[in-house]
């Protein structure tokens, strides 16, 4: 069986790597050549809007899946017409790539979320600010990730500085003074069966995930699972998906949905019997899902902007460095480190990572 993945970043790399024990080959559709993918499969190098190349891609694979949700509508429409098997479905991509459509779906399912308003002009912005109050968050509806494409509006003077030409295809969201940031990851197969991973507690710096760790037996596990399961059933979703939450007091507020494997689930590679990546491949290729049970407490740190050259991991055990083989760039994810928190010796390493890595997120 051959799986086609639209995209060629670290998520594609880890998806293909997770299938090493299966009789599955991969074809990656990428816009620039990715040397790190060469030993994992072949690549078609073309623009996402090149229909001739997309048809070539479709003709060579049995199943198509996505590395991320930022896929042009023209590409999704072409896939709908020409491809036979696509997981997750293109409607899931369309909804989750647009923050307003995403919020509307969350609200329609009765899942609690923070208040929000569409903004396409000055009048709509004024209406949103009157109802939300200050501060609030103004976000691009599409192509926003890792804190990009959003502005924290603290007062009316900051709002007045926005140019009229900026006020298009935006969403204004209520600022949430949360107690915890959480995410739940689940995989749903073609028969509608689910597996769910431990809820993860997340720490962000400037909108980028800094540290995440699994929370076994967390009080919000079942509630988060129920919300995400409701959404996945509605979409007839196949594959791995994540939902992010704010916890305020005892209440969960849904923040975002990722229709793919997720950064807050990278700990599952070493920390579970079957990672989020492997279960995604299992789901889309109709292989029975593997157990998601954690094998301990694990933390993951993103390596952003640069990978420290003076970081000595040799004295520690149950520590795993993942290098994405990317050129360094400010606020770019270049790799991650996962460690077992049950190993007491790793507590010292956590202190080092907390000190050494934070400055790279600024």
Image (tube, rainbow, N blue to C red):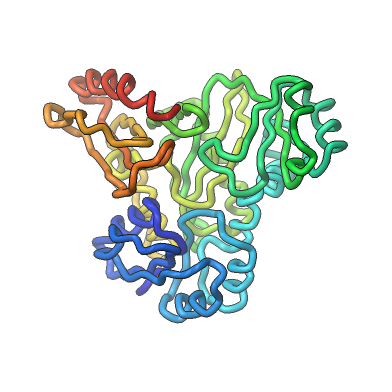
Q: Viewer-proximal residue, 340 or 195? A: 340
Task: Place residue 235 in its image quadrant.
Answer: bottom right
Tell me what residue is drawn at x 70 percent, y 21 percent.
154
Measured from the top left, where is residue 20 in percent x and y? Answer: 25, 61
Q: Viewer-proximal residue, 17 or 272? A: 17
Measured from the top left, where is residue 223 in percent x and y? Answer: 56, 34
Measured from the top left, where is residue 218 in percent x and y? Answer: 45, 27
Task: Place residue 287 in its image quadrant.
Answer: bottom left
Q: Is residue 115 left or right of residue 352?
A: right
Q: Is 43 situated above or below 109?
A: below
Q: Is 233 situated above or below 21?
A: above
Task: Place residue 358 in its image quadrant.
Answer: top left
Q: Is residue 193 left or right of residue 81?
A: left
Q: Is residue 91 left or right of residue 279?
A: right
Tell me what residue is drawn at x 24 percent, y 39 percent.
321
Tell me what residue is drawn at x 41 percent, y 62 percent.
32
Quarter of the rendering occupied by the N terminus: bottom left
Quarter of the rendering occupied by the C terminus: top left
Q: Is residue 50 left or right of residue 10?
A: right
Q: Viewer-proximal residue, 244 or 227? A: 244
Q: Is 201 situated above or below 235?
A: above
Measured from the top left, where is residue 5 in percent x and y? Answer: 43, 64
Q: Is residue 293 visible?
A: no
């Amino acid at each position: 069986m051959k799986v086609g993945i639209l995209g060629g970043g670290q998520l594609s790399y880890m998806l293909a790597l997770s299938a090493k024990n299966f009789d599955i080959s991969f074809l990656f559709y990428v816009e620039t050549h990715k040397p790190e993918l060469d030993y994992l499969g072949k690549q078609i190098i073309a623009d996402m809007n090149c229909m001739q190349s997309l048809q070539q891609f479709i003709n060579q694979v049995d199943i198509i899946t996505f590395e991320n949700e930022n896929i042009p509508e023209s590409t999704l429409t072409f896939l709908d017409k020409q491809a036979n098997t696509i997981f997750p479905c293109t409607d899931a991509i369309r909804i989750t790539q647009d923050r307003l459509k995403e919020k509307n779906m969350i609200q329609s399912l009765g899942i609690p979320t923070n208040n929000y308003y569409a903004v396409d002009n000055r009048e709509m912005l004024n209406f949103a600010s009157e109802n939300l109050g200050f501060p609030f968050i103004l976000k691009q509806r599409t192509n926003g990730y890792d804190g990009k494409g959003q502005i924290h509006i603290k007062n009316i003077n900051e709002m007045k500085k926005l140019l009229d030409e900026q006020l298009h295809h935006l969403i204004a969201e209520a600022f949430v003074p949360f107690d915890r940031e959480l995410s739940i990851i689940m995989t749903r197969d073609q028969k509608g069966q689910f597996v769910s991973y431990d809820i993860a507690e997340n720490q962000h710096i400037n909108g980028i995930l800094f540290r995440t760790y699994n929370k076994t037996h967390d009080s919000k596990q079942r509630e988060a699972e129920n919300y995400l399961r409701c959404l996945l059933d509605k979409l007839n979703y196949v594959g791995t998906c994540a939902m992010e939450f704010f916890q305020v007091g005892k209440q969960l507020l849904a923040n975002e949905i990722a229709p793919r494997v997720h950064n807050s689930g990278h700990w599952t590679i070493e920390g579970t019997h079957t990672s989020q990546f492997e279960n995604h491949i299992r789901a889309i290729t109709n292989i029975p899902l593997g157990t998601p049970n954690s094998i301990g407490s694990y933390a993951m740190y993103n390596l952003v902007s640069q990978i420290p050259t003076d970081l000595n991991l040799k004295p520690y055990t149950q520590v795993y460095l993942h290098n994405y083989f990317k050129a360094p760039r400010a606020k770019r994810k270049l790799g991650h480190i996962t460690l077992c928190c049950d190993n007491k010796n790793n507590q010292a390493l956590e202190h080092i990572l907390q000190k050494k890595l934070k400055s790279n997120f600024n």
